[in-house]
Image (spheres, helix red, strand yellow):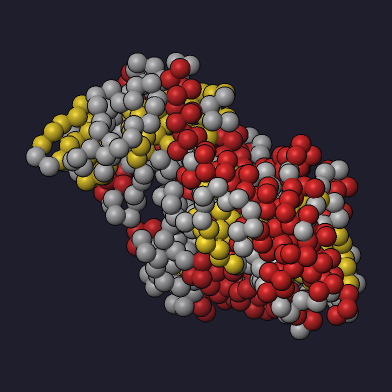
Amino acid sequence: MLTIGISPCPNDTFIFDAIFHQRIDLEGLQFEFRFHDVETLNHKAMSVDLDVIKVSFFTYLLLRQKFELLESGSAMGFGTGPLLISKNEYTHEDLPHLTVAIPGHFTTAHMLFRMFAPSVKKKEFMLFSEIEDAILRGEVDAGVIIHENRFTYEKRGLKKIVDLGSHWEKLTGAPIPLGGIVARKGLGADTIEKLNRIMHRSVKFALEHPEVAMPFVKQHAQEMAEDVMKKHIQLYVNENTLKIGTEGKAAIKKLQEIASEMGLLRQSNLKSESIEQALRSAILQGRIRKEDTATIFYDLTFLEERIRYLTSCFPPATLHGLAIKANPLLRIMEHVRGVSPNIGVEAASIGEVSLALQAGYRPDQIVYDSPVKTLADLEFALKTGIHINMDNLSELERVDKIRNETSTTGAGKLGASQESTSTIGLRINPQVGLGTIQESSVAGEYSKFGVAIKNNRKELEHVFLTYPWLTGVHLHVGSQGCPLGMLAEGIGLLYDFAQEMNERRSEKGFPHISIFDIGGGLPVSYHSDTTPPLMEDYVTEILKRAPKLFDSFRVITEFGRWSYTNAGWTVSRVEYVKHDPGINTAMLHVGADLFVRECLNPRDWPHEYSVFDQAGNLRQGCDEHPYNLAGPLCFSGDILAKGVILPEIKEGDYLVIRDSGGYTFSMWSRYNSRQTPRILGYYNDGERFDLLKERESLEELHRFWK
């Protein structure tokens, strides 16, 4: 019995009637139908809950590794696109200031809207059938409508702002690929071929006998007028439904190209197939040499798409200061700088500031956040003109002293006749609580970072009403393990404080607080079967708590872990395998030197592992005994993971540690004086490789200790 998920919309029930009522040859297959709205179907596809599913084409692009698109059953054509409507007259320039209802995150309609209005960040996601009512009640300013609402909105006094389908057609000249029927690849090629034939028969039968299907259509669209049902079917069922054809496939490819350019085809984690292909290519091309007992890889294509997606979720003026401490490789820093003009860096030391300047970042792209700054550090930062977030009230006093000396003596400490061009903020602890990982949570009642807002409210008010040059606020709730609500509430508390301070600063003639650094902290997934929070959901949560944040402030973000972690993986040669009663131990060339957090706190920092043979082929199955994965350092705690179920591992195999692109090499330990590994970047699953950092030579190691 195969499960089929479709929507109750007339075009779906029309083309599936012959399958549901067994009016055609089903080639021995049996089906159980489930009816859901389009966005629910998209989510069910993501969790692979059904065998055959009607999904939005945008969702199909995200899941094409898991599903096969059937040749028949698609909703695609000209003049079929979603509409942006409202009860008021709005121009394109008005849109960034509006709240817009969207019929689901993963719908093609949402993607078409983002193509037309990428700067709109205030979105409410709801059922497509609820959007008109939400507009009429004033809950949203505008909405993207699909399906039969195209035929009803005008009767309710609503107006079209733009036809998003027409915008697509003018841009591409292609039909609009809205939704298609996909089959789970795990069903096998024979079953999928049967499904292709059955689906074609069903659509053909419906087109040749339209009245036969109408009772089934009416059964699932009882509140819809019959003329609307027929218009719906005529609009969405056409020759592309019978067979996608060359034109349809070209349209899907165009959708994929545009979505990729916009950074929308982001994945939570790299796919196993992608890692296997890249590893095999690296071995074949001699990129992993005999001396390379361990190698770190970065999928630069994945990294670029992830950063483009990040920038698409925030207003264009946002500065995304990627945390250098997550990944201080100069070649990586140089690479991401070229992906978007909105990319900057966040530095936690003067050394990291120097790295940023070396990598070509302008001073206005650098955010300096160190919790321990010397007087010399502050003088250098002010002279350089970078943005500085002060950690405590004593640092503010030091900066005020430096500024006063400069203004009274000319050159002063800054070594120039002009005042510093640095902008200055203050880190405030919002005290919203701890996440699930205590060691990386920094917004509890006590934190070593920043000035606690509850304990020091009067002192905070005093400094913002004393120093006119203090024009920024900064917070960071935690890194990994913090829910969206906690992150957004921290921002909201500082937003309320900054708004109040700006009213009082205006009375004193002070410039407004204009810079708002929200930090980083959005969790990432270390497991391929879990879905982390979406960046766009985070932005939505922020705007619920701080509605005017992006209008009132220039926002800075610091998403280091989120940007880098899932883009990297590490491979170690297995030097030996030890066999003890009930347990095996694989002896690796990386351990606590590269994965210090993982070895000391494996519960909170787990990874996924894969085993490959010497040619780079993925090993399958499970050994009868679990494995401990032991590193090369001389202490008993150097064990990366214990009791892991893996295929049988042999000496000379490769073990891959996934999701190791952030907070790994940057935390490298010099204990036992082991040489740092070779680091490679690659594109398109290993079509091209770039050397990011060479394996450390013994001479370089000697110089470090000399």
- Whether residue 700 is visible: no
- Please state which of residues 539 and 445 is positioned toward the viewer in this rendering: 539
Q: How many discs appear? A: 0
Which corner quadrant of the image does residue 7 belong to?
bottom right
Q: Decide if residue 656 is on the left or right side of residue 418.
A: left
Which corner quadrant of the image does residue 13 belong to?
bottom right
Picture coordinates of residue 63, whole percent (x, y): 57, 47
Q: Decide if residue 373 is on the left or right side of residue 309.
A: left
- Whether residue 686 is visible: yes
Identify the residue at horizontal 84%, vertical 65% (top origin): 231
Identify the residue at horizontal 68%, vertical 53% (top origin): 202
Q: Decide if residue 344 is on the left or right side of residue 289.
A: right
- 204 is higher (above) or lower (below) than 574: below
Which corner quadrant of the image does residue 677 belong to?
top left
- Please state which of residues 1 and 607 is positioned toward the viewer in this rendering: 1
- 134 is higher (above) or lower (below) than 391: below
- Please state which of residues 187 and 655 is positioned toward the viewer in this rendering: 187
Picture coordinates of residue 177, whole percent (x, y): 74, 50
Q: Furthest-bottom residue in view?
A: 137
Picture coordinates of residue 678, whole percent (x, y): 42, 25
Q: Quadrant of the C terminus?
A: top left
Identify the residue at horizontal 82%, vertical 67% (top origin): 230
Identify the residue at horizontal 66%, vertical 39% (top origin): 339
Picture coordinates of residue 92, whole percent (x, y): 86, 61
